[in-house]
Amino acid sequence: MSFSLEGFFSDLVLEVAAESEACGDLSEDSFFSIATDYLIDSGDITNAERVAYLRPGVRVDGFTGDPRDEDGILTIIVSDYCSKDTPDSLNKSGLDTLIKQAANFVSKCTSSSFVDGLEETSPVFGLADLIRTRWPEILKARIIVITNRILRIRSSTIPDIPVNGISCSVSLWDLSRLYDYVVSGKAKEDLIIDFSSDYGGALPALAAHLAETDYRSYLLVVPGEQLAQIYAKWGTQLLEKNVRVFLQARGKVNKGIRETIEKEPAMLFAYNNGLTATATSVETCPTRNGLSLTSITNLQIVNGGQTTASIYDAWRRKKDLSKVFVQVKLSVVDAIKSEEIVPRISEYANSQNKVSAADFFSNHPFHIAIEQLSRQIVAPRADGSLVDSRWFYERARGQYMDEKGRLNSSAERRKFEIMFPRTQVITKTDLAKYFNTWLRRPEVVSKGSQRNFTNFADYIDAQWKKDSTVFNEVFFKKAMAKAILFKALERNVSAQDWYQGGYRANIVAYTISLLSHLFVRSSKEFNLLAIWQTQNVPSELMNELIRVAGDVHSHLVNPPFGSPANVTEYAKTSRCWELLIDKEVKWSKAIDSFIITKSEILRQDKEVKEKVRFESGVDAQMKALSLGPSFWGAVHSWAAERGFSSKDCNILLSASSASFYPSERQAKFLLAVLERCKDAGYVP
C-alpha cells in the first residue's frame, strides 16, 4: 500500500460512508462493523456483536460473545468515531473517559436493579443480562477501544484496571494501529514472555537446528503450572489465529486430556503429543547444565491449543499440576517469513485434533478462482447507471485499499473506484455469510463471522475436491445476487417501525433462509440470476421479505421457555431455526414470479460446463506446449528409469518431439502423468 496515514484515514471515512449508504446505517454503526472486521481478521477477536448504549458515565458499543466460549473472559468494545475531514487526536483524558464508561457499564450489569430497568427486547438488555448471569464464571475482562482518531499519549502501555473485583485489561486500536495492521500486517505489539523474572525461571532447552542455517528450533519441557500461568496472563493471544477459531468452533477443553490431568497427571507427558509453537525471536543463555531459554517474543501455539486450554482449566479449578509436564517444539520464524511459514506449520502440525485444510483457507484455490472471476466479470448496469462496474472480491482483508493505493494518480484511483464501487466490495467472511444463509444455516451465521466461515470453509473444501468446475461464472453471479439480496434486506429492515435496533443480522439471515427453505421444500429453484441481471431486488419481492422479516423479528425476541433468554444466544441455536420452520410462515403468490424452470437450469448448466470444458482443454494444451520438447524428454528419461507404464512413457516420448501437437485429451493426460512423476519424487 503506497498511501500515507492521512490517505488511509480518507479511505476509511469513504468506506464508512459507502457502508452506511448501502446498509442504511448510522456512520457509527458502519465504523464499528468495518473496524471490528479488521480485529477479527487480525485474530484479536473472533466475533463482534453491535450493542449501542450511552448514558451519562456509562457506555458500551459491542461485545464479542458469551464468556463461556472465551475461557471465562468478558470482552467489551467501545467505539469512538470522528466524522471530521482530517485525522483528529485522542488524548489521555478522552481515552480515560471511554475506559471508565465501559468499566461502569460492566459494573452496573452486576446489579439486578440496573438490568431489570432496561427494555427486555433491547440488545443492551440481552448483553446486561448475559453479564449478570455469567458474572460468577467470569475470570477476566477486556475493554477494547476502537477509534479513527490518533492516540496522543507518552505511555506505550495501558495498565489493567479493577472492575468489581476482577482484573480488566485495556486494548486500543486507534487510526495508527489500524493503518499499521493494513500496511504491514503487524496486528499487535510484541508479546514478550520473560522467564528470567516471571513464571518460575528460565526453561532448559535443546537446540534442534544447524548453526549455519537461518532456521532455529528448540525442544522444551514446560511444567504444567508454568504453562497455565502464561496462559492465564496472555489467554487466546497465544493461540495462532486459525487454531483459535478452530477451537472456539469445536469446543476447547478436551475431556480425555482433562481426565489424564486429574487421574494420571504424571502420564500426560507420555500420552500427549505436546505443543508445536512459533516465535519471532528468543533469548538464550548457556549454563552448566546446557542451554536455557530466558524469553520468548510473540509466542504462538499452532498445535496443542486444547492441551493448553485443558491444563489452564485444571489450574483455575485448583487441581494439582506438580506432576504435569508438556513437551514443546518451538520454531523461531522471522517476522517477514511468518506469513508464509506459520500457516504451513499450523496445517502440517495439527494431528491431535485434526484441523482440515479448509481451516487454513486463505490461499485455497476457491478463493483465487472467485477473486479472478470478480476482476473479469462486468456487472449489468443498474437502472440509471451510465458506466460499467465489477464486484470486487477481497481474498484478504484490505486488498481493495491496497490495489487502489498502488495507483499513481488521483485520476487512476478515481477510475478504479468507478470500476469497483465501494458498495460492491465483498470479503470472504461476507461471502460465507451470504452462502450459509442461502444454505439455510441461519443459526450458524448467527454464531459470528469466524465460526460461520469455518463451517463454510469445510463445505467449500469438500465441494472443491468433488467437482471444482461448479465454481464458475454462474456460481459467481449467483453469489453476488445473494449479496445484493442480503444487503438490500438489511437496508430495508433498518427503516421499519418495528425495528428497534439490534439483531438485524439475525433477522436478515433467518428471513432469507426461510425464502430458500420455501423453494427447497417445494423442489423449485429461485431465480437468482434475475437479481444479478438487474443488480437490484424488485419491490414485490422486497415487500414480501419485509413482511416475513417482521414475523422473524417477533420470533427472535420471544424465546420459548427452556431456550436462552438472550436473543443473540437464542439465534445461535438449532432450536430457534427448527421452531421457526414449524410455524410455516406463509408467502404470497408474488414469490411465484421468481421460480426458474428445470429446463432453464439445465440449459444454464450445460452452457457453463461446455465453456469450462473448452477453456480447461485449451489451457492444458497451452501449458503442455509451453513446457517444450526438452522438458518432456527429461521427464520421459526419468519415468522410464523408474518403471513407469508404457502408456505413460509413450505419451512423454511423443511430447519430446518438436512436431508433437497434443489434442485436448492428450494434453490433459500428459499433465496428469507429470503430476504422478512429481508425486513419485521428480523435481523439474
Image (cartoon, rainbow, N blue to C red):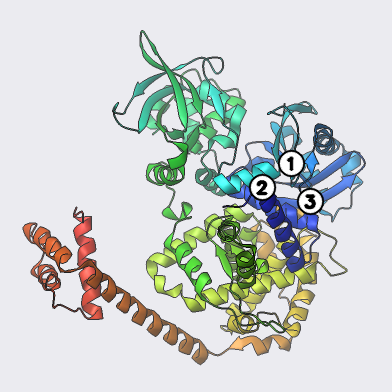
Q: Alpha carbon of mark 2 to alpha carbon of mark 1: how far?
A: 10 Å
* Amino acid tagged 3: Val
389 or 77: which is nearer to us? 389
Provide the secondary structure element on which disc 3 rests: strand
Mark in the foreground, 3 or 1: 1
Marks 2 & 1, CB-CB < 8 Å contact: yes
Task: Tell me where residue 587 appears, x and y as whole percent.
Answer: 73, 81
Task: Tell me where residue 93 appears, x and y as whole percent.
Answer: 84, 33
Give the residue drawn at x 43%, y 43%. 346
On the image, numbered disc 2 is attached to which residue? 5
The label shown at residue 89 is: none
Sequence order check: which comes first, mark 2 or mark 1?
2
On the image, numbered disc 1 is attached to which residue? 150
* Amino acid tagged 1: Ile
Q: Is residue 617 visible?
A: yes
Q: Is residue 138 visible?
A: no
Q: What is the number of callouts on the image?
A: 3
Q: Is residue 445 above or below residue 6?
A: below
